[in-house]
Amino acid sequence: MRIDIVTIFPGFFGPLQLSLLGKATQRGIIDVRVHDLREWANDPHRTVDDAPFGGGPGMVMTPGPWGEALDSILARAGVDTSSVTPPGGGTRLIVPSPSGVPFRQQSAAGYARCDHLVFACGRYEGIDTRVIEEVGTRVAVDEVSVGDYVLSGGEPAALIMIDAIARLLPGVVGNASSVADDSFGGGTGPMAGLLEGPAYTRPREWRGRVVPEVLLSGDHAAIARWRRDQSLRRTAAHRPDLLGSLPAGALNARDRQVLADAGFPVMAEDVAH
Ligand code: JEE
């Protein structure tokens, strides 16, 4: 997968050379190019911002350099820069924005199937919206938010998204099942829609705290049931919203009892008529 990133802070993407993403690059699974937006700013001061029309605080990124940068990157990728073609193909432009659609595990899985992603990382109060409109006539454009908090720019959001996408590519994470078993990732598995429970490793006792006996029992059914109980309790405590959006029939009578015992009221199972 080819990944182009446009930013006024190229140094922000140093972490992509580390750890899992660095290995993915060495293995040729991802090819990341970071571009300094100011290379497309033509004035002597390499200006990329201006005051907002209509007034208000802060500055807005001016469309000129963005248009030139994205034309150049999309032309190299073989995306037609002159005629109006429907979105699609292997290239998508992702614009991190506090007003974007939420980025979820399913978004990461969708982007992992693309050949080419371009991230347009804004700063200040964001990018002149005509850039998103105009480029959207030539390539699929998504305005995406990584969460309900305000960042100072799109760079940390792009790092988060690239991490979540790249680890889904074949050959990036060694153990494929550790990807499938993730919270949110098990779309069809028994833990679908629940958070992961606690993890333990050696030693069996540490600072007086012992590993739950069931995990040492070798009783795989009992271990699976215990883990599900832990997942349910943690989900209820940390993300009660997730319990509300589980598919119908996801909770059996035992699940409901576990939640009730933990003090979380659950609606009775729907009865088909
Ligand atoms: C891209 C610039 C900074 C700060 C004003 C903020 C007022 C833009 N989940 C996410 N949070 N934030 C971003 C994100 C932030 C960005 C840019 C992404 C480019 N900024 C910025 C303040 C404001 N508004 C919301 O309340 C109203 C705008 C992001 C992602 N992805």
Image: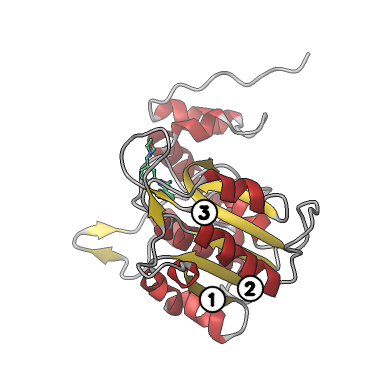
The crowding category of the residue bearing disc 1, from other C-alpha atoms within 10 Å (few below 14, some 14 to 19, many at least 20), is: few
Where is residue 33? Give x, y as percent: 54, 76
Residue identifier under label 2: 2
Residue identifier under label 3: 63
Q: Disc 3, disc 1: CB below 8 Å?
A: no
Q: Secondary structure at mark 2?
A: strand
The image quarter containing residue 248 is top right
Closer-to-camera residue (36/117): 36
Where is residue 13? Give x, y as percent: 42, 71
Q: Disc 1, disc 2: CB below 8 Å?
A: yes
Pick the quarter of the image with the C terminus.
Answer: top right
Where is residue 47? Give x, y as percent: 39, 62
Q: Which residue is found at the position 63% from the left and 45% from the top?
A: 133
Q: Give the residue type at disc 1.
A: Arg
Q: CA distance from mark 2 to mark 3?
A: 24 Å
Closer-to-camera residue (15/196): 15
Q: CA distance from mark 3 to mark 1?
A: 21 Å
> Which numbered circle lies on residue 33?
1
